[in-house]
Image (cartoon, rainbow, N blue to C red):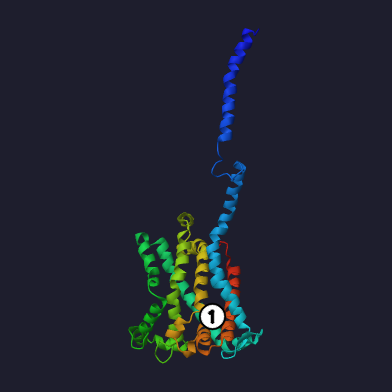
């Protein structure tokens, strides 16, 4: 005979047991979540998610890596192989590890190398002297005209490099207004004494080539400078003025040091392409102002001496790499990376 207390206990525990059975049945019948691997649980899904997160940077780098491999690494090794070949176009070129291509190129075209780096350095300095005040004015004084001035800086990019250089050929022509003004103030006599011009003309002179390089690469100097100047906190200037610093002191102690990353970036973006440029020397210069880019073009397209042209290209690249490495080491690159 069952006691009343036992009956009450049995009747109270019965629903709970039924609920637990239902819950177990439901769990057995529910399919795995969509993010879970078959046969896995939440731990497997979390590991898959972490693996995808780890691989994301590599997937993002893949297009640029393929691009560099196709258009830089492959041509690099091809030109390296070509630079140590010997032979002729009729007999064919073979890899003979002929390193005299390098010594011959240096001996023959040393003036072209020196001229290229001299013109590029002069153009870079002029770009800095012209671009820094302009970038400073746009960053701190332009106000609502800032956008318009920036558009004017990049406006030359709306036309081709070749068209811009040909326009300078017209501007510097012998009968043009620029030559007339310089003649009237006898400035051409001064530049002639410096060896920059000759015969009372600008075209086909070193000055014309440097002017073309300066004009074409000036935006590459202004934009990094503006970006660096625009990020300077205005409160630093106010603090310097509160300490009774003169404007020249504020610029020397605050503005210019903080803009050095832009100066470094701008000089590199200007000097490197200007060193290998050949369009300006071709259109605005003369045979006496040819740069190493013109010599490489001539060896590749006219003389068809591919090993010599490849050796000159590698010498140019090596010199630029050394110069840039030393420059960046001296200037510091913490803000550039």
Residue 31 occupies quadrant: top right
Whether 1 is drawn above or below 312: the answer is above
Q: How many marks?
A: 1
Residue 174 occupies quadrant: bottom left
Which residue sits furthest bottom? 199
Whether 3 is drawn above or below 145: the answer is above
Q: Residue at x 56, y 80 (%)?
A: 313
Asked whether the viewer can see residue 181, the reply is yes
Q: Quadrant of the N terminus?
A: top right
Q: Nearer the viewer, residue 258 or 102?
A: 102
Where residue 237 appears, x then y in whole percent? 46, 57
Q: Which residue is mark 1?
A: 117
Tell me the element at label 1: helix
Q: Nearer the viewer, residue 236 or 213?
A: 213
Where residue 139 appears, x then y in whole percent? 42, 62
Where residue 213 appears, x then y in whole percent? 45, 78
Q: Quadrant of the C terminus?
A: bottom right
Where residue 13 appears, x then y in whole percent? 60, 18
Q: Is residue 337 left or right of residue 285?
A: right
Q: Residue at x 39, y 78 (%)?
A: 164
Q: Nearer the viewer, residue 205 or 179?
A: 205
């Amino acid at each position: 005979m069952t006691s009343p207390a036992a009956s009450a206990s049995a009747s109270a525990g019965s629903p709970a047991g039924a609920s637990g059975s239902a819950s177990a049945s439901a769990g057995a019948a529910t399919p795995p979540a969509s993010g879970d691997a078959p046969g896995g649980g939440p731990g497997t899904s979390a590991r898959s998610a972490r693996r995808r997160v780890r691989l994301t940077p590599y997937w993002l780098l893949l297009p640029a890596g393929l691009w560099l491999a196709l258009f830089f690494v492959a041509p690099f090794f091809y030109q390296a192989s070509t630079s140590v070949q010997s032979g002729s176009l009729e007999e064919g070129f073979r890899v003979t590890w002929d390193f005299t291509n390098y010594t011959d190129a240096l001996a023959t075209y040393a003036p072209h190398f020196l001229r290229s780096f001299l013109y590029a350095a002069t153009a870079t300095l002029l770009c800095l002297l012209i671009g820094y005040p302009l970038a400073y004015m746009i960053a701190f004084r332009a106000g609502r005209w800032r956008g318009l001035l920036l558009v004017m800086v990049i406006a030359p990019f709306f036309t081709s490099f070749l068209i811009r250089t040909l326009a300078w050929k017209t501007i510097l022509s012998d009968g043009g207004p620029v030559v007339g003004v310089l003649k009237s103030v006898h400035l051409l006599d001064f530049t002639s004494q410096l060896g920059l011009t000759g015969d009372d003309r600008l075209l086909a002179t070193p000055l014309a080539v440097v002017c073309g390089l300066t004009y074409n690469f000036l935006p590459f100097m202004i934009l990094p400078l503006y970006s660096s100047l625009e990020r300077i906190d205005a409160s630093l200037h106010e603090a310097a003025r509160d300490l009774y610093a003169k404007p020249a002191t504020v610029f020397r102690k605050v503005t210019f040091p903080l803009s050095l990353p832009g100066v470094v970036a701008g000089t590199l973006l200007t000097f490197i392409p200007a060193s290998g440029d050949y369009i300006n020397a071709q259109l605005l210069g003369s045979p006496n102002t040819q740069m190493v880019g013109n010599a490489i073009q001539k060896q590749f397209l006219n003389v068809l001496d591919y090993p010599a042209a490849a050796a000159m290209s590698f010498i140019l690249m090596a010199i630029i790499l050394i110069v840039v490495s030393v420059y960046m080491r001296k200037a510091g690159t913490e803000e550039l990376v």
